[in-house]
Image: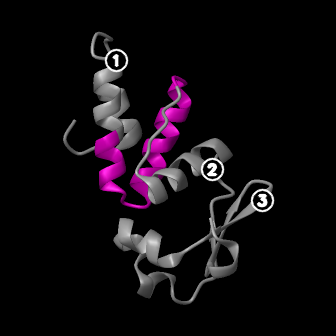
Amino acid sequence: MCWFCSDLKVKVVGEQIHAHKFVLAARSDVWSLSNLASTNELDLSDCKPEVAMAMLRWTYTDELELSEDDAFLIDLMKLANRFQLQLLRERQAEELHAEFFDCIVDGVSFAKCITMPHM
């Protein structure tokens, strides 16, 4: 990401990532320019670094690299819920459906964990 034209720093465990408010605002109302106007930092230090980076990568590129680790998938879905990233949730659900079509998942506990209203 272009550090000299960034207007936001994203704090991820152990480092700060340069970001752009208008890119984040394009993805979620939670990150609207009016909501981000008074801040220079988005603190994601409470997230696992690989999950935060996956979300940021998707925010900028629309590319989603999913880990087969269940905890990663659930944490990414929680982060998508936190920032109301509906397109990321839908994309992740599509990827999971395609990848795990034959697997049986306890849908009730999974839905409770990620609070998806349509499950």
| Mark toward the start of the polypeptide (1 vs 3) | 3
Q: Are marks 3 and 2 in contact (CB under 8 Å)?
A: no
Q: CA distance from mark 2 to mark 1?
A: 25 Å
Left or right: 104, with 67 as reference point: left
Query: What residue type is disc 2 on?
Result: Cys
Q: Is residue 70 above or below residue 10?
A: above
> 118 or 95, which is in the foreground?
95
Element type at mark 2: loop
**CA–CA distance in space, label 1 to label 3:** 34 Å
- Residue under the image location 50 percent in, 82 percent down: 36
Instruction: Please name the residue that numbered disc 3 is placed on.
Output: 15
Image spot of residue 38 (x, y percent): 56, 89
**How crowded is the residue under tag 2: few (<14 C-alpha within 10 Å), some, or many (20+)?**
some
Determine crowd level at label 3: few under 14, some 14-19, many 20+ residues with C-alpha closer than 10 A.
few
User: Of residues 72 and 66, which is closer to you in this image?
Assistant: 66
> Which residue is found at the position 69% from the left and 79% from the top?
4
User: Residue under circle 1?
Assistant: 100
Q: What residue did someone put label 2 on?
A: 47
Quadrant containing the N terminus in the rendered view: bottom right
User: With 95 as the anchor, is 33 left or right in this view?
Assistant: right
Picture coordinates of residue 88, whole percent (x, y): 36, 49
Of mark 3 and mark 2, the one earlier in the sequence is: 3
What stretch of residues is rendered in magenta? 68-91
* Residue kind at label 1, given as amino acid type: Phe
Q: CA distance from mark 3 to mark 2?
A: 13 Å
